[in-house]
Amino acid sequence: MVLTIPKAELTGVFLESLAYGCVYLMVFNECMFVLRNRQHSRPNDYLVGTAVSLFILITAHLVIDIVRNMDAFTSNEGVPNYPSTYYGTWDTWKNIVKSGLYVAVTLVSDAFILYRSFILWGRNYLITTFPFLLFIADIAIGVFWVYTLSLVLPGENVFFGALSIRVTTFYSITLAMNVICTSLIAIKILKIQRAVSSFSKGKEAQVSRLVPIIVESGSVYSAILVVMITTYTSGSPAMFIFLNSMSPIIVSAFSSVIVRVGLGLSHGDSHHTTGVISSARNPWATRASNRNPMNSQQVYTPSFPDGGVQVSLQKTIHTHIDGFPDDIESRLSRPSDYKHKHSPADYKPGPVYAI
C-alpha cells in the first residue's frame, strides 16, 4: 500500500489525538497540580507560563488538524480524489495557522530547554551564548517558513524549492541547539551524580541515575527531530505522520521535567522544601521532616561563593544552589575531610534545601 499525503495526514491526526488524550492531558494535569501545591514557594513564573502556553498551542494545533481532516474527507465528497486536492493546497489560512502553531510550540520548547541549561549551569551566560544565538536564528527561520508557505502554489511539491530549504534549516538549527543543550544538561547531571556517587551503591542506584538524564536532557526531542529531518529530506509523506503527532509527545516530555522541578526532584531547582529530598537524585538522603529535632545531627555549613552545601555526620547533603561548582564537587567526594578539619563544636544547624 502506497503511503500518500492524505493517508499520512489522517494517520498523523489519529496518533496526535491519541497522544494528546492518553498522555499529554494526564501529564499536564499532574503538572498544574504540582505547581499549584508547591510548598513554601510560590509557583515559578517561567514554569507556569511554559506549561500554560504549551497547553494552549497544542490544543489549538489539534483542533486545526481535526478541522482540516473533516474538511478534506467530508466536504466536496462528489469531487474525485478531493483529499489529495485539499492537502495539495498549501496556502490556505488553516494550513498557515497550523504551521505557525507548530513553529510556536517548537520555539517555546526550545526556550524551555535553553533556560534549563542556563539554570543548571549556575546562570552562566558564557555557556549558553551559542545555543542562545541558535535560538534567535531559529525564530527568524521559523517566521520565514510560515511566510514562504503562504506563497506556495496549489499542487507544488513542498519537498523541493524555497520552502524545503527553510523547513530543513529550521529543523537543523533546532536539532543543533537541542543537541548542545542536551549535552550540557547531561554533562552537568553526571558531574553532580559523580560528586555524590560515594553515597549510592549498587546497580539499582546506577540505573536510577540514568532516569533524570534521559528525562531532563530532552533526548527524546532530539531523537524525533532526527526522524523529522530524515523523512523530510527523503521526500516521504511519512513526514506528515511525525509532524502531526510529535507535538504532544514532545510537550509531554517537557511537562514531565516541569513536574520534576515542581516537586523539587530536578537538578537545578532552587525552591525551598521541608519535605522529601529526591531519592532519584539522592538515594542516600533521608526525610528531613521525620527527624527528631531533639536528636538531630549537627550540620556543618561551609561558606561558598556560589551557594551553600551542608554535610552532616550521616553523609546527608542538602543544597539550594542551581548546580554544583567544581570546587564543591571535589570536596563532596571526600566528606571525611570535614570530620578531621572541624570539631563537633564547629557544626551548626542550617536550613534544609532540596538539590
Image (cartoon, rainbow, N blue to C red):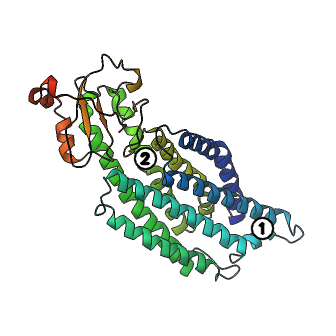
Question: In which quadrant is the C terminus drawn?
Answer: top left
Residue 24: give x, y in percent of width and height.
61, 46
| Crowdedness near tag 1: few (<14), some (14–19) or many (≥20) residues, C-alpha within 10 Å | many
Residue 261 vertical position relative to residue 102 in the rendered view, above or below: above
Q: Residue furthest left?
A: 341
| Crowdedness near tag 2: few (<14), some (14–19) or many (≥20) residues, C-alpha within 10 Å | many
Look at label 1 and name its amino acid. Answer: Pro
Q: Nearer the viewer, residue 248 or 346?
A: 346
Q: Determine the secondary structure under disc 1.
A: helix
Residue 335 appears left or right of 158: left
Residue 259 appears left or right of 243: left
Q: Nearer the viewer, residue 194 or 307?
A: 307
Residue 330 appears left or right of 77: left
Residue 62: give x, y in percent of width and height.
69, 57
Residue 208 in view of the camera: yes
Look at label 2 and name its amino acid. Answer: Glu
Q: Determine the secondary structure under disc 2.
A: helix
Residue 2 in view of the camera: no
Query: Which residue matches tag 2?
Result: 216
Q: Residue at x 40, y 63 (%)?
A: 177
Whether the residues at callouts 2 and 1 have beta carbons within 8 Å, the answer is: no
Q: Residue at x 49, y 37 (%)?
A: 39
Query: Which residue matches tag 1?
Result: 83
